[in-house]
Image (cartoon, rainbow, N blue to C red):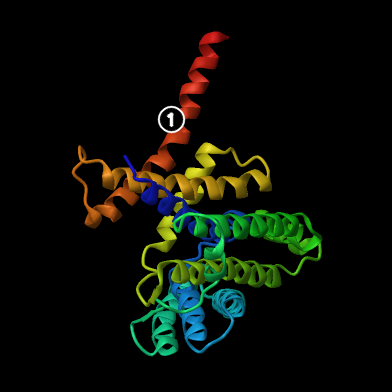
Amino acid sequence: MLSEIAFYGAIETGLIYGLVAFGIFLSFRVLNFPDLTVDGSFPLGAAVAAVLIMEGWDPWIATGCAVLAGMAAGAVTAILNVKLNILNLLASILTMTALYSVNLRIMGRPNIALLGEETVLTPWYSLDLAYHQVPVLLFIIVIFVSLILLWRFMKSETGLAMRATGANPRMARAQGIATGAMIILGVAISNGLVGLAGALFAQSQGAADVTMGVGVIVIGLASLIGGEAVVTPATVLRALIGCVVGAIIYRLAIGFALNADILGLKAQDLNLITAVLVTLAIVLPGVRNTVTHKLTRKKA
């Protein structure tokens, strides 16, 4: 069983990865744009926020700059695809690879410690809450605001044009939609959300590291697919809620797996657990539909 601190820690990390799942939902599901840039924009957001906080900037302004940096990274990927006709997957790999050097250049060293520095969490520790409950409260607010803003954007004229671009780009162009601009904007927003997640992760963990983005794309996909298996994405709002639910379930599953002595799993088995969870998330909806179909036929 998880201890109270481990439980809240899993919720805290799950909420942060919910922002990553939002970004992946926007690129993979809305735009049909496979984007691996997130493995670079996540540590980019952490690096920008950490460096600016170390320089004495206000933590919220530093976090906003991290969002802008993530958006710039996403825009580069989209421009490589739209303007230079580079395959979207390859364009994202090129940007992700370049961002490793960019992040090292920003930080000046492989990692930066934020222990003792003022972060977005610092004022919240004055509340009458346990130390491990404070980040959960703040990140719930951040997730809620991000979800509402993204949901409203998806219902706007621009959001509908973006959804049309992902669903049928040829038809969208025939209707006068600038599909290239929609792709650039969508991938930029996607990586802006990931940059925000990276900035918050660095401040909650007390450090930014150049390698902290390794595997983030897999975690985001696990959250997205797992959430869709639990919350049927019939609408955009349900899909966004599913992203958060999937991210939290993923982190709780990781916590339970690592703390279950009967399984004998250790921290080095994290990638193995992730691969198993993603496989189950992909397979289970199909199995569920098959079983439901057979039961329906028997009743008929």
Residue 204 against residue 147 in the figure, above or below: below
Viewer-proximal residue, 219 or 15? 15
For the point 49% across and 46% down, the residue is 246
* Residue 172, quarter of picture: bottom right
Of residues 10 and 25, the one drawn nearer to the viewer in this rendering: 10
Residue 71 visible in the picture: yes
Where does residue 256 sit, x and y in percent of width and height? 33, 43
Quarter containing the N terminus: top left
* Residue 171: percent from left, percent from top: 74, 57
Q: Secondary structure at mark 1?
A: helix
| Number of marks drawn | 1
Q: Residue at x 64, y 43 (%)?
A: 238
Q: Position of residue 132 (x, y in %)?
A: 44, 56
The residue lying at 39 percent from left, 80 percent from top is: 100
In the rendered image, is residue 28 in sight?
A: no
Q: Is 150 displayed left or right of 251 in the figure?
A: right
Would you place residue 67 above or below residue 197 in this image?
A: below
Q: Determine which residue is flagged by label 1.
A: 287
Percent of width and height locating residue 92: 48, 72
